[in-house]
Image (cartoon, grey):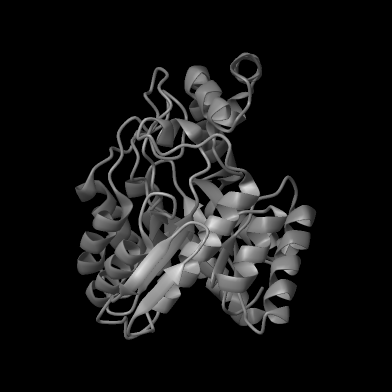
Amino acid sequence: MNQSTEYGVFLPNAAGGWMISSTAPYPPADYDYNREVAVLAEDAGLDFVMAMAKWRGFGGATDHWGETIESMTMMAGIAEATSRVRIWATVHANMQNPAFAAKVFTTLQQIAGGRAGMNIVNGAYADEFEQMGLWDPSVTKAERYRMTTEWTELVLRLWSEDSVTHAGEFFTLNDCVSKPHPSTRPTIISAGTSEEGRAFQARYADGAFLGAESLDDMRVLAADVHERAIAEGRSVKAYSMLTVVVDETDAAAEARAVEYGRGLDREALANMRRSWGIPADRALAWAEGASGEQAFQTAYVTGSPETVAAHIRSVVDTAGLDGLMLIFPDYLADLPVFGERVLPLLREAEADA
């Protein structure tokens, strides 16, 4: 395992967190709750916290993600509440003018004392943006990435140039000034596995979040992003996500996972699939036949602290990752256990490697 392996937490700033289940803990879309989670993550010795941006939920019995709080403003408060952990907030390039985003993240970088990061997303889910009049169904994925590339170039220029004038395919700036510049450029984060996504990550991102069907596939993607970045004269870290169900014994942890699966919210699950572009009838048919494991929105591990640590070491080593962003069904109960009983085993393994 690489000595620099990083572990962070995906904050639950949308109601229900990352479990689509009526029998799982239900984190509220609440600043106080997320601040407490972030402080616990820092106290546990984790490296970063990240919050998504979400503008519409998925209904169902749990009204999954029906309530959310905004990422950038929430993370400004969390920056004040913490002193070490890195603070990564999400911004939609299709919603926010690059001049606005440049100013917001310069401000966040000041509040965070140099710990801020910008997770750039390009707005790919129709339901979120149709409600705002911001969705054009004729725009292709390639066009969204061209838009995001142009947007990112402009943000970088606004962070470093005295004035920016630009007439492009998607944005126009006329003698645009954004001062002060950040004393240290915020970290840039990007998630995606497509060809366009990996090309963007290699060129602009400091951290690339990846997903795959198997660890072998993940290793190929991580190696590809690393190699593309080297070709650009840069370096980028590869991350993925993992949900952790930890308990005193393997059996107790597995029992918790089974209980969470029992309450799978099939309607919310179908609506989530539909938001990805899957026809409604197919999404519903799939959700009706889905196993309880689908209550977990990411890959997950169950077990005792020793089992969880061994699994995490295997994931990182096999997939060639630089870090993992962790999700907990019950953040307030599970994070301290992870910090006290799992993370020391991981750090010990790193020291012995």
Q: Which residue is drawn at 32% across and 52% down?
A: 71
Q: Which residue is drawn at 20% across and 68% down?
A: 80
Q: In this view, does 286 lie to the left or right of 147?
A: right
Residue 225 percent coordinates (x, y): 69, 67
Looking at the image, is 52 positioned above or below residue 59? Answer: below
Q: Considering depth in this image, is 164 or 202 the residue closer to the camera?
A: 164
Residue 87 shows up from this direction: no
Q: Is residue 61 left or right of residue 265?
A: left
Residue 104 percent coordinates (x, y): 28, 65
Residue 339 percent coordinates (x, y): 42, 62
Looking at the image, is 82 positioned above or below residue 11? Answer: below
Which quadrant would the C terminus be assigned to in this image? Answer: bottom right
Q: Considering depth in this image, is 310 or 95 the residue closer to the camera?
A: 95
Q: Considering depth in this image, is 20 or 140 the residue closer to the camera?
A: 140
Residue 201 percent coordinates (x, y): 60, 66
Res 238 → quadrant: bottom right
Residue 226 shows up from this direction: yes
Q: Which residue is drawn at 64% across and 70% down?
A: 202
